[in-house]
């Protein structure tokens, strides 16, 4: 059985290169053993690792959508992801329209995990909160702590590069870190929550802003907690305000109704006179 080594749990380029070569050589999915990281490979020291025989004997084709899906699914924690994606690639050689069949077990499995990754990335984009560390050489420095469900740091970080290109920042997670400094992005090992301060100088202003824009008339607790699951609250400065805002929403809503201006404004009077 070919033992295929991958550099890391998110080694999409490595998987893609090996999968293409294996598929071209006609190696069946059940005959491939995917391994990633030195720890797993070390457990089976002595086994011969598969090496591609270049060039591949036949061309391997897959729709662009499959490339996108595989890029996402590789970030999932499901241990079957490498094997399942390879099986889908092999099937696509004889069934080029396979991805259109959402009821197919392999397609459904892939779509479900890609959806989970998109959701996890969206949550990271929405709930990362930077704390200001200070300034260096005229550039503001920030750090944030986040705990994603899956290994999405590389997938999610380009969003922050586009949004905050003019400041230095670091996003730390338990397994991976991303550092943007002096216009260069680099990735490193995981970190600890204690590496990021609990508060900063602008946090009070952010909380005041959040409380000010809270609209009790539009409060839907169930929808809010579905969009903002409580597991993220411990890293959100504004989260400690939410229970109080919810508890006081009824009184605030009542006060808003009682202070509604019912008399015509000066502008409306002028408009009426022009008619």
Image (cartoon, rainbow, N blue to C red):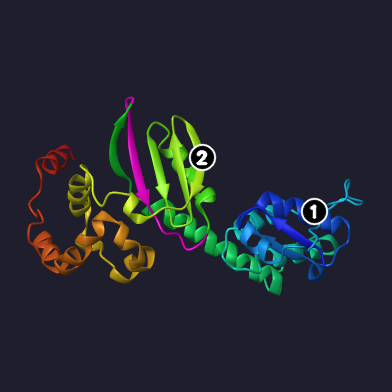
Relative horizontal placement of residue 212, taking residue 229 as reference (left or right): left
Instruction: Tell me the magenta residue range.
Output: 137-150
The part of the image, by quadrant, that contains residue 22 is bottom right
**Element marked by disc 1:** helix
Q: Residue furthest top?
A: 137
| Residue under the image location 21 percent in, 58 percent down | 215
Is 234 covered by the magenta stretch? no
The residue pinned by badge 1 equals: 20
> Do we see residue 254 in this rendering?
yes
| Residue under the image location 92 percent in, 51 percent down | 57
202 w.r.t. 192: above or below: above
Q: Earlier in the sequence, mark 1 or mark 2?
A: 1
Q: Please tell me which residue lies in front, 117 or 225.
A: 117
Q: Please tell me which residue lies in front, 48 or 253.
A: 48
Q: Residue furthest front?
A: 46
44 w.r.t. 16: above or below: below
**Element marked by disc 2:** strand
Disc 1 or disc 2, which is closer to the eye?
2
Give the percent coordinates (x, y) of residue 53.
88, 50
Q: Quadrant of the N terminus?
A: bottom right
Give the percent coordinates (x, y) of residue 62.
77, 54
| Residue under the image location 74 percent in, 53 percent down | 63
Q: Please tell me which residue lies in front, 196 or 156.
A: 196
Relative horizontal placement of residue 101, taking residue 112 as reference (left or right): right
Relative horizontal placement of residue 56, taking residue 137 as reference (left or right): right
> Do we see residue 100 in this rendering?
no
Give the percent coordinates (x, y) of residue 178.
47, 45
Q: Which mark is residue 186?
A: 2
**Label 1 to label 2, Cα distance in Å?**
28 Å
Q: Residues within 10 Å of mark 1 (few under 14, many from 20)?
A: many
């Amino acid at each position: 059985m070919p033992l295929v080594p991958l550099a890391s749990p998110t080694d999409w380029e490595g998987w893609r290169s090996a999968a293409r070569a294996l598929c071209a050589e006609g190696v069946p999915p059940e005959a491939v053993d995917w391994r990633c990281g030195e720890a797993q490979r070390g457990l089976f020291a002595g086994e011969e690792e598969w090496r591609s025989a270049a060039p591949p004997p036949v061309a391997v084709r897959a729709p662009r959508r499959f490339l996108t899906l595989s890029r996402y699914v590789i970030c999932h924690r499901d241990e079957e992801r490498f094997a399942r994606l390879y099986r889908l690639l092999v099937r696509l050689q004889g069934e080029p329209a396979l991805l259109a069949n959402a009821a197919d077990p392999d397609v459904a499995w892939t779509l479900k995990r890609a959806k989970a990754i998109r959701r996890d990335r969206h949550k990271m984009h929405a709930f990362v909160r930077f704390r200001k560390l200070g300034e260096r050489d005229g550039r503001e420095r920030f750090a944030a702590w986040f705990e994603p469900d899956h290994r999405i740091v590389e997938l999610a970080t380009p969003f922050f590069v586009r949004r905050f290109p003019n400041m230095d920042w670091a996003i730390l997670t338990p397994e991976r870190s991303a550092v943007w400094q002096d216009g260069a992005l680099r990735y490193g090992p995981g970190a600890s929550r204690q590496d990021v301060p609990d508060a900063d100088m602008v946090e009070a202003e952010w909380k005041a802003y959040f409380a000010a824009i809270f609209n009790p008339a539009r409060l839907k607790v169930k929808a809010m907690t579905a969009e903002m699951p409580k597991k993220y609250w411990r890293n959100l400065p504004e989260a400690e305000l939410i229970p109080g805002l919810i508890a006081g929403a009824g009184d605030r809503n009542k006060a808003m109704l009682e202070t509604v201006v019912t008399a015509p404004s000066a502008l409306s009077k002028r408009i009426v006179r022009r008619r």
